[in-house]
Image: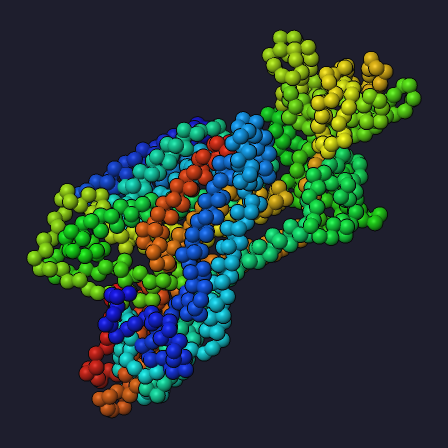
Amino acid sequence: MSATTLSKVMLLVAWFAYAGAATAALMTALTKGERWLRATFWCAVAGLTCHTIGLVAITVGHGRAPWGTLYEWVVSVSAVIVLIALVLIVRRAEFAALTAIVYGVVVVLMLAGASQYREPGALQPALQSNWLTFHVALALTGSALLLFGGVVSALYLVRVRWENRYLTSVLGTTGTEPPDLAAGDEVVPLRETDDREGDALAGSGGGAVALAAPRVEVEADTEPVPVGTTRRGLGGRLPTSFALDDLARKSFTLAFPIYTLAILAGAVWGEQAWGRYWRWDPKETTSFIIWGLFAAYLHARATRGWKGTGAAWLGVIGAVAVVFNSFFVNLVIAGLHSYAGG
Amino acid sequence: MTDNSGKTLTPDKPPEKAEARPSEPDGFSHLPPTPMRAMQRLGGWRALRSMRTAIWLLLALVAATLLPTLVPQELANPQGVRDWKEKWPAFSDILERLHLFDVFSAPWFVAIYAALLVVLVLCLVPRTRAFVRQVRRAVRRPGEGALPDVALQAEWVTALPAEEAARRVVPYLRRRRWRVGKANAAGQCVAEKGAAREGGSLLFHWSFLVLMAGLFVSAMFGWSGYAVLVEGREWVETPMSIIQYDPPVFFEDSAHREFTLTLDTFDVRYRDDGSAADFVASVRVADEGETVIAKEVRVNDPLDYRGVKAYLHSFGWAARIVVTDPVSGDEVFDDWVILEPGGPRNMHTGVVKIPSIRPQAGLELFFAPTGVVLTQEQAAAFDDELGPNVLLAQRPGPPTPDAPVVYFREYRGNLGLDRPQPIGVLDKSRLGDPVDIGAVTPGGNAFELEDGLEVSFRELRQYSRLQVKRDPGLGLVAAAGVLLLVGLVPSLYLARRRLWIWIRPDPDGQERTVITLGGLAYQRKEAFNGEFEDLRRRLEALAPTDADSGATPNESREST
């Protein structure tokens, strides 16, 4: 069996495993079953194993890193996203419902990548550079983290909507604690207390202190909400908006320096290969847009009137720009990066 | 901030209030403002220097940058611009007026980023001043008061006297790089750590001004263009010999050393599909008659001589074409003609312009390194400008010169040289239709045209096109990139933290000391929980709990 065939078979198996993981994660969210959680984990592990074998097969088979074509690029980005989701679920089991959507996105992404399949070829001389390998590896990791964060931000928006509607109706206040309230529980409206201007690039919002939060005593006669009732919907099954916001922040703050370094490494390579570190070719332009959006996100997090939903929207738009950069720019717009699209 | 009213702690005091009593020492529970607050405290220009303005400007810049991904740009895709102008002339006219074909030098684009830079500087100057003040000045001795209601607190009692406990606790904190301030009469002091966060943030933002400075220097004093080198031939670095020369704004006269480049050999290794697997140009640099550099220039490995860099851009074949006018016996043309790949039927094309005879003559060359003879059907199948009667094509695969042949068309008339035109293009508007055709091979016989001109193909060599440029701002741009990263990482991952330390003799008397710690992280609160707990444990080991006293609780509480 040739390396190409092996990689195709392995990636197909991985795809099915991810579809299984997405389903199992969904079941985890619906039933809160420990068994489904385990199934999600092992499906994803099996998928990532096959995925890795597939990528290694491409690497060995062609003697180069597995991102010579758009298809390979998308497959590599997917692997990094799955790895992020796996790390997350090992550390924080309550994010199971969220990973259902992450695996779903990976399944769609891989399908979209496969639709652009090209027989892999050798690289042009200009592409044979260590700086370039470094550049693409970083861009890949950064893109995966940004996409992941974008999904989390989207879910944050869903959750905030739900919290505003549901908790307002139940508690008569805007709170963000998990909905499984028992009489006498404290509800701390964290978004309110966090509403302070912090310093620039202050990831956590830079709010001076969250210690003076007014504590809302839940009335003893408030009905605790039974698990699994229709009133909960998707929003009710998600982690709290605070947890989602924090997770999105973590992925974006991790991604931002990586993406910045990717752009800089690309500029170094461009300087060596083309004699220009920056020439506003479509890929560079879109990268700049993505970078600008996430720079705005990081500042927005620390700015009153922007933090919370405003920042989350920027994260979502940024993630859409990442997808746009991977597909549209490669396929539709010509430029010096067009060979990346194969 | 109404939520906080009525609490003992007011972390964000109104600026006016804070400024009203600058000399008065702050209470022990005082929380210094965040750097952004410090910035706003300086008053005036508030709306302009606010983060919100900066975010909107940044988003405007992003939106403006989106346009070039949708509209072709003169710089990156001139052919696309021409196509648009042909397809939609009226619409393109509007786009042209809005500078949408050249967004990055459009006045409105420059206005956006200039405004962003102004806001940036307006924010950075007060922030930097505040930062420098904060770093240079020792941490203030606090006024006496109660410990602020911070989430992280610890208290224990030690048998050591208060002075001894302080002698152990404070140096330890200093070793852990906490900046510990002086204690007040009550034994209260504060310690700070993590100023590098703000420092990094400032460095990150300032680096954009360094970047702009680099771009400015490049534009003012740098130049760029292309050099075409034929094997074995010399090329002198002068503005005249640089193709598509983009001159510096200042000091053009002294910008060129006029050194000599010689392309000794050019080697290409082809793949079976005809694409190049690897290519190397062996280049020599001579300055004032002496060879100073001999280097193999590769794609990712440019030549660098005294700030002038030469990058391998493209390569191909060059033919030495000689045209003789038998009437006068003069050689009216004798030069190396660059044959660009990408012509019809995989052939390479070049142009000969002879302005010295009347009427002027122009030759359009089609070069096949390995020519193959076609049948008329095959030629017709190409359906290109050469037509079914030209039975020549380049063999598919690597363009090695196995059977080199030049097919050419002759034009007579006006070359139109009164208008500027690219070297490799024939302006046919005043030349009319070709008057004759012919074919020559290297070293072969001269081809006699009907009007008497004799064309011969003396020699075939390879040429290499190098992009040459001097970019004096590059160092600044590179420095900006490094500063940007060096600043970015601490600004995202470090947290500003503050400790309150209160070491006092036990009010219940006896020879005991009560130590109280309070801790607060402005960012990354979760990570600080662990750090605070570790700190408490270590300090407790240095100033051990009095085992005999069960009276005072040994408390360490955490809450959010």
Question: Residue placed farthest to the left in the image?
Answer: A221
For residue B244, side relative to residue B155 (left or right): right
Q: Where residue B211 appears, x then y in whole percent?
A: 57, 55
Question: Residue placed farthest to the bottom in the image?
Answer: B510
On the question of residue B171 being in view, the answer is yes
Question: Residue placed farthest to the right in the image?
Answer: B328
- Image quadrant assignment for residue A246: bottom left
Question: What residue lies at 51% left-to-right and 39% top-to-bottom?
Answer: B68
- Closer to us: A66 or B405: B405
- Image quadrant assignment for residue B169: bottom left
- Closer to us: B429 or B317: B429
For residue A309, side relative to residue A335 (left or right): left
Up-down: is B446 above or below B12?
Answer: above
For residue A174, side relative to residue B24 (left or right): left
- Closer to us: A289 or B499: A289
Q: Where residue B441 appears, x then y in whole percent?
A: 78, 19
Q: Where residue A124 appears, x then y in whole percent?
A: 58, 35
Up-down: is A3 above or below A223?
Answer: above
- Image quadrant assignment for residue A181: bottom left
On the question of residue B458 being in view, the answer is no
Q: Quadrant of the N terminus of chain A?
A: top left
Question: What residue lies at 30% left-to-right and 61% top-to-bottom?
Answer: A194
Up-down: is B389 above or below A23?
Answer: above
Up-down: is B260 above or below B363?
Answer: below
For residue A231, side relative to residue A11 (left or right): left
Question: What residue lies at 14% left-to-right and 47% top-to-bottom?
Answer: A227
Count of all numbered marks drawn on residues in the image:
0
Q: Where residue B257 appears, x then y in whole percent?
A: 78, 50
